[in-house]
Image: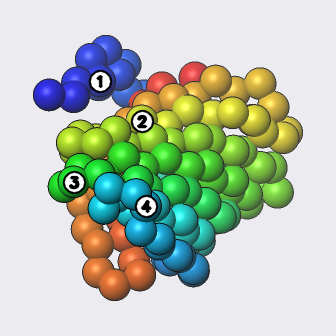
Amino acid sequence: MFLLGPVFAADNCSGHYVNFGQSGDASEQPGGNTLAMFRATTINITDDKNSPMNMSVGDCVGTAITAGAKTDASGRCTRKDKDGDLYSYEWAMPAGADKGTWKFVSGTGKYASAKYSGWWQQTMAEGKVAGGIWGGNCR
């Protein structure tokens, strides 16, 4: 079982995301495993409409390794807000988990020293579109 523990209790930011797949490639690896790489355009919709991250848009890249019936995925995204400030974060979804984690790794302007982090959960996928919910500590 995968638990994120205190992250849930500390949520002071939350919202939804939508990713639009742009490209991807997969290859068979030894032992029947699969390595997939992908790129997506992403939009962040915060529950707090006054959040500077609301309606921020950018790009994500990621990899997924499937071994047996379990997939482990991770990647990085960069989004730009309405003021032109950028924030970059890394994300991970361990094999067998229903929730992943994210954390800021860099930013410009108001995000230059931000240490935001949290959880995310995919709630829908249809063709090249996927979306879900997220929460975390954005202070």
Q: Nearer the viewer, residue 55 or 65?
A: 65
Crowding at label 1, few (<14), some or many (≥20) Cα neighbours within 10 Å?
few
Q: Tag 1: residue type?
A: Leu
Q: Which mark is residue 29?
A: 4
Query: Dot 2: what SS?
Result: strand
Quickly name the residue at label 2: 101
Asked if one can make out residue 61 in the rendered structure from this viewpoint, the answer is yes
How is this picture coloured?
A: rainbow
Which quadrant would the N terminus be assigned to in this image? top left
Quickly name the residue at label 3: 68
Specify the farthest residue to the front: 30
Would you say the residues marked 2 and 1 are in contact, meaning their CB atoms lie under 8 Å apart? yes
Nearer the N terminus, badge 1 or badge 3? 1
Q: Tag 2: residue type?
A: Thr
Q: Tag 4: residue type?
A: Gln
Say which of marks 2 and 3 sits in front. Answer: 3
Crowding at label 4, few (<14), some or many (≥20) Cα neighbours within 10 Å?
few
Query: x, y (%) of residue 69?
Result: 19, 55
Q: How many marks?
A: 4
Would you say the residues marked 2 and 3 are in contact, meaning their CB atoms lie under 8 Å apart? no
Q: CA distance from mark 4 to mark 1?
A: 31 Å
Residue depicted at x 54% and y 65% = 37
Specify the farthest residue to the bottom: 127
Q: Nearer the viewer, residue 8 or 5?
A: 5
Residue depicted at x 69% and y 27% = 114
Crowding at label 2, few (<14), some or many (≥20) Cα neighbours within 10 Å?
many
Nearer the N terminus, badge 2 or badge 3? 3
